Image (cartoon, rainbow, N blue to C red):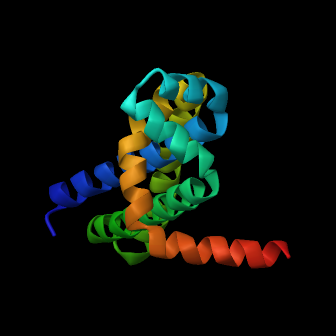
Amino acid sequence: MNPWILSAIILLLVMFSAFFSSTETAYSSASRIRLKSYAESGSKKAKRAYKISENYDKALSTILVGNNIVNIAASSLATILFVSFFGETNGTILSTVVLTVIILIFGEVMPKNFAKENSEKMALASSGVLHFLMVIFTPVTFILLKLNNMAKK
């Protein structure tokens, strides 16, 4: 595959990782009282965000599944890219180090810090995409939630 296209896909996947990480922090930090107040004022996004916050376990499962998918895909593609330039051993080591740093900074720390400071705003902004993903990932999250409930017993 063309290295530029591969790089663009990796960048897109890191952006999705940032979305998932910031959304996780936004919903874990957002005031449900404020979200409910915004929802009662008639905001469609706020109604959806409040409904998601009421079903936080499913939202969290969706976020974790999505984040794992994009991080594993980015890592796999980065390995392909780096191996094509640096050979199998060096490419594998370099891709692991470089992508770990990139995901840690741009896919985890920065998005979570931003979301912590802007939790309600971020919850509202991400509610549409998160709701869509919650529907798409329902079969997977259903199984995860059942396993989680069994482990709690």
Determine the residue located farthest toward the right in the rendered image. 153
- When the figure is inspected, residue 76 is found, relative to residue 21, above or below; the finding is below
For residue 126, what is the image quadrant? Answer: top left
Q: Is residue 67 left or right of residue 153?
A: left
Residue 134 x, y percent position in the rendering: 44, 59
Q: Is residue 76 visible?
A: yes
Instruction: Identify which residue, 129 or 111, lies in the foreground.
Output: 129
- When the figure is inspected, residue 36 is found, relative to residue 102, above or below; the finding is above
x 61%, y 29%: residue:
116
x 57%, y 61%: residue:
61
Q: Is residue 70 visible?
A: no
Instruction: Identify which residue, 80 or 110, lies in the foreground.
Output: 110
Residue 119 x, y percent position in the rendering: 56, 28
Q: Is residue 19 left or right of residue 1?
A: right
x 58%, y 39%: residue:
27
Residue 93 x, y percent position in the rendering: 49, 66
Instruction: Identify which residue, 114 or 26, lies in the foreground.
Output: 26
x 31%, y 56%: residue:
10
- Name the image quarter holding the N terminus: bottom left
The number of numbered discs placed on residues in the rendered structure image is 0
